[in-house]
Image (spheres, helix red, strand yellow):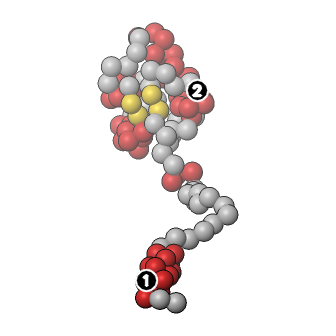
Amino acid sequence: MNKLSKLVFASILSCSTFFVYSEQPIKPVVTDKSDVISIIYLNKANEQSLISLIGIGRNKAAAIIEYRKANGNFTAVDQLLNVKGIGKNILNKNIHRLKI
């Protein structure tokens, strides 16, 4: 083997250590539903989406939808406080997930 061949072989060998072959694609592991944050759009959310919020059950979800029907779309997230049964505590626990 001449010097050029040895050099090329050494280069290829050193580069190959940077590549890892895997037959399966690497997928992120989600261990808990709390690891995944979904945004809830108050003016579009259905009952099922609203129930995914902390402290919101079927009755409060229905109250949010009824409030929206009676008063029109929300213009700010804090208007959720106008819905019967929704207080600052519930709003604060969910504010990071709420959008208009």
Q: Position of residue 23 (x, y in %)?
A: 67, 63
Q: Residue sitting at 46 percent across and 9 percent down? A: 70
The mark lying in front, picked from 2 and 1, is 1
Outermost residue toward the front in this view? 2
Q: Which residue is mark 2?
A: 47
Residue 62 found in image quarter: top right
> Label 2 vs label 1: CA separation?
70 Å
Residue 30 found in image quarter: bottom right
Q: Amino acid at mark 2?
A: Glu
In the displayed structure image, the side of residue 78 where residue 42 appears, left or right: right
Look at the numbered disc 1 and give the secondary structure of its residue: helix
Q: Residue sitting at 38 percent across and 25 percent down? A: 100
Q: Which residue is mark 1?
A: 4
Q: Position of residue 26 (x, y in %)?
A: 59, 60
Q: Residue sitting at 41 percent across and 34 percent down? A: 98
Look at the numbered disc 2 and give the secondary structure of its residue: helix
Residue 68 visible in this rendered orientation of the protein: yes
Near-viewer residue (50 or 39): 39
Q: Position of residue 58 (x, y in %)?
A: 60, 30
